[in-house]
Amino acid sequence: MSSEGIATAVLISGSGSNLQAVIDAVARRDLPLDLRLVLSNRAGAFGLERARRAGVAARAELWDRRAGELRGAYDARVLAALRESGAELVLLLGWMHVLPAAIVESFAGVINIHPAYLPEDPAADFVSVPGGPEIPAFRGAHALRDAIAAGVGWAGATCHLVTPAVDRGPVLTREPMRLRPGEGETDALERLHPVEHRVLTEGVARWCASRNAGFSTFSTH
């Protein structure tokens, strides 16, 4: 894609719905990104095909656990690939591994999209929905499933900076979504996708504006 903009690498694990939202936003010039690399930890991830169709370099980087590869060695390979791409910004769009501090601290920004409405206070374990109730801050890999199981009636999406503390980085943008009575995870996820796409592109745009202005209003420390 365009060589103008902030050099960016993307980490994915699956179909790449959020990746497509970023690709489309870059094509519309809504995001000033130069997409350098899409890396997947799954060989069959459809997001790799999305990237290639958009002219973005894409490949799988697999953790060879069967051969006894240590997690630290795998993380080192991922970091080497990201550095080789020249990325300043790394986007986690469904990446199903927790990033170690060595990777997080190697780039100007690492941004994640999380399928829950998270509090602005990273230490808080509950969040107040605007005009609604206070609900738990659903962190972790199964946030939407956990929200449905808890019966709280709300889900959402949050775009945040990544820190070593999982899903507790500074919030860039967020939006709640009311769950429908009896709604299952598949249907809820289908409705959540447009919310995620909107929150993601707004959050990344906000970070880019801060970066391009020559200062950062967001601290990860």
Image: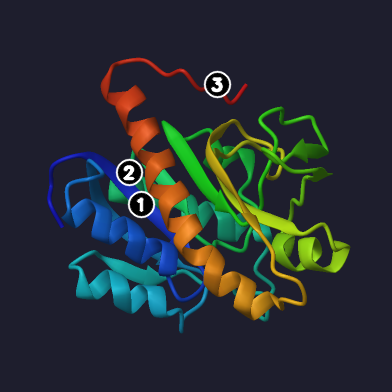
Q: Secondary structure at mark 3?
A: loop
Instruction: From the image, state whether disc 2 or disc 3 is nearer to you.
Output: 3
Reading the image, the residue beneath label 3 is 219
Q: Which image quadrant for residue 132?
A: top right
Q: Relative to residue 143, is residue 51 drawn left or right?
A: left
The residue pinned by badge 2 equals 87
Label whose residue precedes the other's in the sequence (1 or 3): 1
- Most extreme residue toward the front, as rendered? 131
The amino acid at mark 3 is: Ser
Element on which disc 1 rests: strand
Label 1: few (<14), some (14–19) or many (≥20) C-alpha neighbours in 10 Å? many
Circle 2 SS class: loop
Q: Are marks 1 and 3 in contact (CB under 8 Å)?
A: no
Residue 83 against residue 58 in the figure, above or below = above
Q: Toward the viewer: 109 or 184?
A: 184
CA separation, marks 2 and 1?
A: 6 Å
The residue nearer to you, when weighing 86 against 132, is: 132
Q: Residue at x 17, y 56 (%)?
A: 27
Q: Are marks 2 and 1 in contact (CB under 8 Å)?
A: yes
- Looking at this view, is 41 or 52 the one in front? 52
Disc 1 target residue: 9
Residue type of the residue flagged with mark 2: Ala
Residue 19, compared with residue 212, is above or below; it is below
